[in-house]
Amino acid sequence: MNPIIKVIIPAFNEEGSIAHVIREIPEIVSEIIVVSNNSTDQTESVALENGATVLKEEKMGYGYACLKGLEYISKLENKPNIIVFLDGDYSDYPAELTDIIAPIIYQDVDLVIGARDKKLREPGSMTIPQIFGNWLATSLMKLFFGAKFTDLGPFRAIKYDKLINLNMQDKTYGWTVEMQLKAIKKKYSYTEVPVHYKKRIGVSKVSGTIKGAIFAGVKILSWIFKYSFA
């Protein structure tokens, strides 16, 4: 039996990139869910034109958008087996989705992170704060929990039932690290798959601003220390 796979794409003003992302997602995906996070451009109409299910979340925050997608899925009669999270800025290579879900399908792994390998990254695709933040966060996770993560990459796949069991709470920048920390705590099996990464279309709403980079860093570290002393 083929697994039911759904993709959730949080998107804020990604009219220039969202069509590229949707078109390159492999056909094995049963539904592409674009969550417009209070977009003021044509993101929603472009996503609809390209066959995606479009949801609206007016509360700003990456986590809010992801939770909106999960709320929608929870009301479906046929639940998916696998959920894939993917950004709408076209910095990832959607076709690599098949590589990311492979460990779940063939090795029964619970969580797979698309790790933005240095050798596979386009020069300038990640900012210095992003690179440092990933190194610091994953180093602390290794120190405190013995984790083997090397990245907090947003391109990831997880079994749907395992995801629901995590009871995700973060509404903004801490969504990715919360998922990884909770997976460690619950002793989920996990792995990383090296993925290519390129310069995004448009300006990042997080790493592209000093404010966004600082807030993201603080949120990520707060989750790590919260679990370290829990």
Image (cartoon, grey):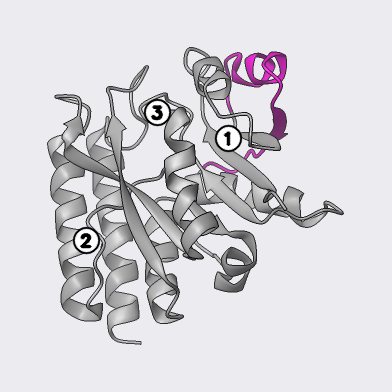
Label 2, label 1: how many angstroms apart (C-alpha)?
Answer: 26 Å
Q: Is residue 170 above or below residue 61?
A: below
For disc 2, the neighbor class at 10 Å (few under 14, some 14 to 19, many from 20) is many
The amino acid beneath tag 2 is: Ala
Is 205 positioned to the left or the right of 131 in the image?
right
Q: Position of residue 149 (x, y in %)?
A: 26, 61
Comes first in the chain, label 2 or label 1: 1
Is 98 positioned to the left or the right of 6 in the image?
left
Comes first in the chain, label 2 or label 3: 3
Q: Nearer the viewer, residue 160 or 47?
A: 160
Label 1, on which residue?
37
Where on the picture, by quarter, is residue 126? top left
Residue drawn where x is 15% and y is 59% of the image: 136
Label 1, label 3: how many angstroms apart (C-alpha)?
Answer: 22 Å
Mark 2 vs mark 1: give the one in front. Answer: 2
Q: Which residue ends up furthest to the bottom in the rendered image?
A: 230
Label 3 residue SS: loop
Label 2, on which residue?
137
Label 1 residue SS: loop
Residue 56 visible somewhere in the drawing: yes
Residue 9 located within the stretch drawn in magenta: no
Q: Which residues are magenta?
A: 39-60
Where on the picture, by quarter, is residue 6? top right
Label 2 residue SS: helix
Residue drawn where x is 37% and y is 32% of the image: 205
For disc 1, the neighbor class at 10 Å (few under 14, some 14 to 19, many from 20) is many
Label 3, on which residue?
93
